[in-house]
Image (spheres, rainbow, N blue to C red):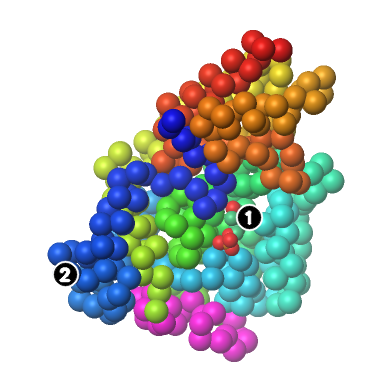
């Protein structure tokens, strides 16, 4: 039976990317050595990093003056690296979920943090819109896609100060106006690669402005100067990221990823809204295209476990909702096909007929 992988992260990758990674793990570029047993400084590996960086810049239309890094530590380490490198006095944060909250917690160790708005009281079911970003903040931090709650900022915001974004779970799913940001980062395990590598896009001239001493491993400038090779980077995940970036380009780029994301999301939300058994949890205007959250309608609440079993038996993987939201979450990242989303929709329709 075909498995439809709706896992939230680590998550689905294009099948050919996984196959080509597997091949390189057995024999990298016909060298007779595994990708896992070569130096990150080997002459064959440098072109991999270079190509990954070049494709990232090309696909996201990253202007001159920005660097792309591939580091370890996950998005969670970036929660601390961001204030370490950019927070001199005051930073503004939008609190749209658990990940945003964790970023805020780290920043508080470095200076004044203004939480401009929060949707915590409504269990983060919407993205606040009515707030003012202080004009004297060093930056305004947002989480563009809230993986757990299924809300997403699908357009770049206006901000009086440079923005910084955690784009772990929606990078490469739409075009971005990079010039509005001094830093964009994310764990690659949602839309790009297996776990182990973190992507960072950073504006070069925004670095070196804080007065504190920054430990080398946490200093973006050192990683920029070292071309992501200050220490041993995650070689295998970087290779996979490069293959995924090639795949995105072959498929037609981020504009095409966005078109498909809209198509898949419309298909699934359409069914959630039509089917009497289910309701969506996120405010309609803020609905994420990447993580689609829904629960049983109140009068069918007792069918939750039954539906999970029913869908799992039909090959739907990873649709159990996060414990803080409950119900179901279908993550529809770039590599998810429309056919798989249709299979879930068919499942929901079949289940409805039984009740
Ligand atoms: C998964 C996720 C994180 C955490 O990433 P790690 O790489 O595990 O640290 C942070 N932010 C968002 C939006 C996420 O989806």
Q: Which mark is residue 293?
A: none
Magenta segment includes 157:
no
Q: Who is closer to the viewer here, 82 or 246? A: 246
Which of the image's four quarters has the N terminus?
top left
- Residue receiving disc 1: 142
Magenta segment includes 229:
yes
Residue 312: horizontal and vertical position, in percent?
A: 58, 32
Label 1's element? strand
Eyeballing the image, is 21 above or below 216? above
Residue 175 sits in quarter: top left
Residue 85: horizontal and vertical position, in percent?
A: 57, 76
Label 1, residues with CA under 10 Å away: few <14, some 14-19, many ≥20: many
Eyeballing the image, is 34 above or below 194? below
Q: Residue furthest bottom?
A: 213
Is any part of residue 148 visible from this angle? yes
User: Is the distance from the Cβ of mark 2 to the nearest ligand 1 atom less than 8 Å?
Assistant: no
Q: Which residue lies furthest to the right in this view?
A: 121
Q: Which residue is at 57% across, 85% downward?
A: 214
User: How many marks overall?
Assistant: 2
Label 2's element? loop
Residue 14: horizontal and vertical position, in percent?
A: 37, 44
Eyeballing the image, is 254 above or below 187? above
- Residue receiving disc 2: 31
Q: Which of marks 2 and 1 is nearer the N terminus?
A: 2
Residue 80: horizontal and vertical position, in percent?
A: 63, 72
State the extent of the magenta-drawn residues as a range. 210-231
Q: Which residue is at 64% across, 30% downward?
A: 309
Which one is closest to the eye, mark 2 or mark 1? 2
Q: Which residue is at 49% across, 28% downward?
A: 341
Is any part of residue 284 visible from this angle? no
Q: Quadrant of ligand 1?
A: bottom right
């Amino acid at each position: 039976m075909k498995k439809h992988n709706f896992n939230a992260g680590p998550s689905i990758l294009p099948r050919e990317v996984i196959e080509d990674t597997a091949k390189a793990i057995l024999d990298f570029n016909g060298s007779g050595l595994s990708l896992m047993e070569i130096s990150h400084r080997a002459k064959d590996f440098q072109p991999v990093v270079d190509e990954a960086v070049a494709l990232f810049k090309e696909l996201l239309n990253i202007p001159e003056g920005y660097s792309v890094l591939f580091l370890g530590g996950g998005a969670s380490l970036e929660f601390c690296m961001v204030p370490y490198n950019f927070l001199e006095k005051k930073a503004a944060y939008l609190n749209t979920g658990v990940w945003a909250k964790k970023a805020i917690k780290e920043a508080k160790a470095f200076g004044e943090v203004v939480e401009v708005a929060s949707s915590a009281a409504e269990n983060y079911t919407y993205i606040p819109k009515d707030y003012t970003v202080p004009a004297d903040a060093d930056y305004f931090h947002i989480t563009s896609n809230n993986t757990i709650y299924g809300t997403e900022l699908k357009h770049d915001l206006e901000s009086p100060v440079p923005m910084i974004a955690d784009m772990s779970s929606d990078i490469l799913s739409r075009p971005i106006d990079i010039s509005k940001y001094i830093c964009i980062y994310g764990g690659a395990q949602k839309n790009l690669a297996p776990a182990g590598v973190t992507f960072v896009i950073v504006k070069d001239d925004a670095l070196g402005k804080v007065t504190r001493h920054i430990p080398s491993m946490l200093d973006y400038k050192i990683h920029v100067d070292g071309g992501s090779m200050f220490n041993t980077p995650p070689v295998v995940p970087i290779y996979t990221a490069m293959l995924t970036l090639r795949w995105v380009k072959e498929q037609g780029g981020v504009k095409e990823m966005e078109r498909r994301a809209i198509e898949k999301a419309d298909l699934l939300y359409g069914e959630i809204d039509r089917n009497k058994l289910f309701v969506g949890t996120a405010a309609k205007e803020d609905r994420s295209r990447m993580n689609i959250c829904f629960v049983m309608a109140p009068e069918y609440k007792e069918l939750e476990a039954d539906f999970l079993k029913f869908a799992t038996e039909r090959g739907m993987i990873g649709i159990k909702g996060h414990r803080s939201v409950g119900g179901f979450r279908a993550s529809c990242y770039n590599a998810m096909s429309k056919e798989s989303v249709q299979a879930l929709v068919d499942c929901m329709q079949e289940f409805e007929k039984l009740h």
